[in-house]
Image (cartoon, rainbow, N blue to C red):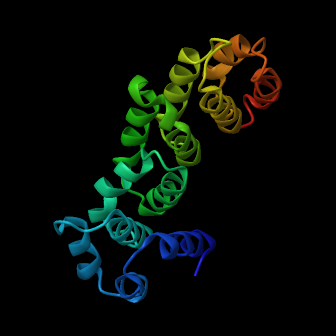
Amino acid sequence: MDEEFRSLTDRLRREAREPEALGRLIATEDHEELAGVLVERERPLWAREIAAFRLGCLGDRRAFEALVLLLNHREPERCVSAAHALRLLNDPRTPRAAAALATNTMRTAYALHPVRLLTALRAPESVPTLVSTLHRLLNPDEPHWRVALACVEGLGTLGDERARPVLEAALPHPRLGTAAEEALGRLGAG
């Protein structure tokens, strides 16, 4: 059992009011049973989450839609689990979906994990999306500075020269300056 799965099951054991049902979803090797949980009516969120996570980690693309919804959830732990499973799922739709979530101005508060996922994916959409999102968040009074910081760090990790102008613009920002300086030092090395 990997660390992400252990963390997910520990969290869901506290949340689930049906320990036997949870145990079954943790133990089953039946992909059809897991996929059925994603479409059955009146299934609790914890059941859908574990089914989507397990299917995603197994590369079963039926989990894609559920994982994208979880990636944009208000509870950060759900986002972390979804991002992990989406990385392993290796679905070609993932970068576009993460980019759409990262750039949605109405959901900026929930964009941290889509931004981190885009960095991890190193997809063609990654740099343009992180540049666009960071540019929008450069106001010093921006309440979502953690998302902006994730963009700066992601652009440094990706090391793409196209990020230079926005990283230079981030230098005077009180919460981003140090990270922007480090990211600029990494350009061309990614």
Q: Is residue 136 above or below residue 4?
A: above
Q: Which residue is at the far front?
A: 17
Q: Is 111 on the left or on the right of 151, as rendered?
A: left
Which of 157/2 is in front? Answer: 2
Q: Residue at x 42, y 47 (%)?
A: 73
Q: Image height check: is 171 above or below 68?
A: above
Residue 25, picture quadrant: bottom left
The quadrant the C terminus occupies is top right
Quarter of the image for residue 139 reads top right
* Relative depth, front residue between 1 and 182: 1
- Residue 152 place in picture, x, y as percent: 68, 29
Q: Is residue 21 above or below residue 75?
A: below
Residue 63 vertical position relative to residue 179 in the rendered view, above or below: below
Measured as percent of width and height from the top left, residue 68 is found at 37, 50
- For the N terminus, give its image quadrant: bottom right
Q: Residue visible at 46% across and 33% down?
A: 102
> Would residue 23 be found to the left or right of residue 141 on screen?
left
| Left or right, residue 65 beside residue 185 | left
Q: Quadrant of residue 178?
A: top right
Give the residue furthest to the left: 41
| Residue 94 on image: x %, y % | 39, 48
Give the number of marks: 0
State the residue at coordinates (42%, 86%).
Answer: 23
